[in-house]
Image: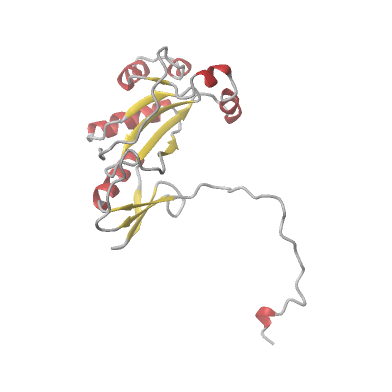
Amino acid sequence: MDTMLDTSSRARRTLDSKPATPVLFAHFVLRSSNIQPMIDWYSTLLNMHIVQRTEYICFLTYDQEHHRLGIVNLAGLTTPDAKTAGLAHVAYTMADIGALLSTYRRVRALGIEPSRCIHHGPTVSIYYRDPDGNGVELQVDRFATKAETAAYFQTAEFKKNPIGVAFDPEALVRAYEEGAPEADLLTMPDGPPAAPQSPPSTPRS
């Protein structure tokens, strides 16, 4: 008898019937006909490094996870237009407002401009478009705890304006460097509700 199939001496167990939730968001994968600019862009914005690269795919990470991003190299792909359904953006949380603003200034000096900057209420967010036009959000939580942030979603203020208010990142950088308290930097500015974001018809960096 094949001992690998012999279960007579094994303790039995039962699969849990309760729905399971993921313990980690591991990675996402993009397809591109523009692989080297894509590798360079994500390496710059997210401080990533290459784990492994072949002619077919490149794996990158920014922490201990074996990979956070895969970019598949395929020739002849077309860019989705503004009327194509699909992913709007992926988002990354920075450690604090200083990390968000220092990243903005660092990558802007390298030619990577934000597509827009929105204080959503629960987060302060800066959006970018990669060389293929995919959306990437860098954000910092406004509140000290996840519970406080989640509670904000239930407020009348958020229901009235679930998108948020546009802000000037240069003004926020100046306020940071002038020593403004972090609580002030994270406060939503006055202004009209920002318009919903539409995907661009052409990619931009």
Furthest residue toward top: 190
> In the rendered view, would you say 76 is above or below 182?
below
User: Residue at 60% across / 23% down in the picture?
Assistant: 154
The spot of residue 104 in percent (x, y) is 32, 30
Furthest residue toward front: 83
Quadrant of the image occupied by residue 90: top left
Near-viewer residue (107 or 119): 119
Furthest residue toward bottom: 1
User: Residue at 75% across / 72% down in the picture?
Assistant: 10
Q: Is residue 189 left or right of residue 57?
A: right
The spot of residue 61 in percent (x, y) is 40, 49
User: Residue at 28% across / 47% down in the picture?
Assistant: 38
Tag count in the figure?
A: 0
The spot of residue 32 in percent (x, y) is 30, 52
Quadrant assignment for the N terminus: bottom right
Near-viewer residue (1 or 177): 1
Quadrant assignment for the C terminus: top left
> In the rendered view, would you say 132 is above or below 151?
below
User: Residue at 68% across / 79% down in the picture?
Assistant: 5
> In the rendered view, would you say 105 is above or below 182?
below
Near-viewer residue (202 or 171): 202
| Image color mode | secondary structure
Quadrant of the image occupied by residue 98: top left
